[in-house]
Image: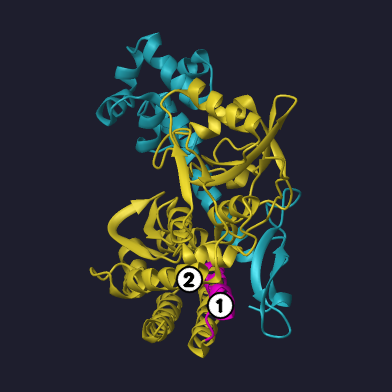
Amino acid sequence: MKKEEIPQDKSALENMTRELCYAKNADGKYTTGLSTGWEVKKDALDNAWDDIKERIEDARKAVKNGEKSPIHYFMELRLMDMMILKGYTGFWGFSIKRHLKPAVFAKLGDEKLKLYAKAFEVSLEELKNFKG
Amino acid sequence: MEKEFKHIQAAHCENGAVTSLLRYHGLDFITEPLAFGMGSGLFYLHIPKITINNGPAVFYRTMPGMIFSNSSKALGVTVNRTKFSNEQKAKEFLDQKVKEGVPVGCQVGVFNLPYFPPEYRFHFNAHNLIVYGKENGNYLISDPVMETVTTLSEEDMIKVRFAKGPLAPRGHVYFPENVHPVSDEVIKNAIVKGIKRSTFIMLRLPGGIVGVAGIKYTAKQIRKWRDKLGPRKAGLYLGQIVRMQEEIGTGGGGFRFLYAAFLEQANAYIKNDMLLSASEDFTKAGDLWRESAVQMGRIYKGRINNEQKDFEVCADLLMQISDIEKQAFTKLSKIKF
């Protein structure tokens, strides 16, 4: 890549920073330059977010239809998978899987729910009362 | 120590942490490409059959901390590393270092990093930043991927240092110790060591999923994705590859240009035309990595209107990249240092 080819596209990095890139100067030697963003990367990131939004919406519907507990929704909302939620709550994977069932969730005590609420950074009430 | 800490922007956070910390301790010769090369940062691994973030498990980086450990060790620098189980103790330790005036590196998660744009905040736990002071209760932060310095509140600092999930930082703090001036001879040896280690990783590790063989493995998989997963999901998979490959200057193209720059700088210490020739190869490989990203972009942007032949173009590019990198490392392996 030549220095003048460093992409200067609009991206989410706007107003935060520019990225440092290594590229060749006119003499064919490596130098650095700054990039405001690259369309190809922006599209990949946008696509990933479209996918995430779809997953959140699906999760919302699943809660609304009584198929999944609110934990499922907040997991998607906070971009968490099982490994991450295990880390934040300290629960075992199989416990979390059980808590995803609405019937099991309804019987969970506040102590356990508080751990989830803390992990998702929502209040206990928000978690309990989320209906989808 | 009344030295002033100087913020240095880097393409990759760990390279940047190594470069600015070692420079602070007087090793003025160190540059990001040298740190990257001595630390053998170039890597490729495609783990079959598992998915990460609903996409293929392709890794462009070595384990976090490896670049720092490898490059420091080769330069005779000790790295003091501490992790914590207790948040309060982690905070006290950091505050103590700040009080002593010692800039330290911190491993953090980016999900709660307030100065990152929301679009970039995933649960990625191996980001690196440097704490070089404290003012009005806020930590002074030099984040190597940022153009300028920034700050973090105490509360945010604890959050990012104790992010959970894979590669959880557990408050990880590190800083170089016993840094002595190094001779050109030591620098040369560190360069050679770095090149040899990378050659081994990229050419010789068995299994067919690491290094140049791994790149070919990915190419073969890409040819199958469309039939196996359907056009839409196959497109999302390519999007995931591009994100892993090019995110904030790392992975595919960015790492090749860094490596090419490393070999160019290495030539200043060890005169050898093969280094420059291999550097040219990596420049070419970097350009092709970028071209592959552009091609993948064409596919996932269209989402549905993608055809098998478009995937074949991506796969062919990766095959070509693999050949060029193999040729480059073979050249490097033949140099009699």
Question: Is B254 covered by the magenta stretch?
Answer: yes
Q: Which quadrant does the N terminus of chain A fall into?
A: bottom right
> Which secondary structure, mark 1?
helix
For residue B309, side relative to residue B277 (left or right): left
Front residue of A81/B124: it is B124
* Most distant residue in the top direction: A110
Residue B222 seen anywhere in this rendered image of the structure: no
- The location of residue A16, given as percent across then percent down, is 72, 48
Dot 2 or dot 1: first in sequence order is 2
Question: Is B248 covered by the magenta stretch?
Answer: no
- The location of residue B190, given as percent across then percent down, is 46, 67
- Dot 2 alpha-carbon crowd within 10 angstroms: few under 14, some 14 to 19, many 20 or more: many
Colour for chain A in the figure: cyan
Residue range highlighted in magenta:
B253-271
Write the residue at 59% across / 44% down. B129
> Which secondary structure, mark 2?
helix
Name the residue type under label 2.
Ile
- Dot 1 alpha-carbon crowd within 10 angstroms: few under 14, some 14 to 19, many 20 or more: some
Q: Mark 2 points at which residue?
A: B191
Write the residue at 34% across / 13% down. A108
| Colour scheme in use | by chain
Determine contact: label 2, label 1, CB under 8 Å. yes
Q: Which chain carries label 2?
A: B
Q: Which chain carries label 1?
A: B
Write the residue at 64% across / 36% down. B114
- The location of residue B138, given as percent across then percent down, is 70, 29
User: Vertical placement of B24 versus A82: above or below?
Assistant: below
Chain rendered yellow:
B
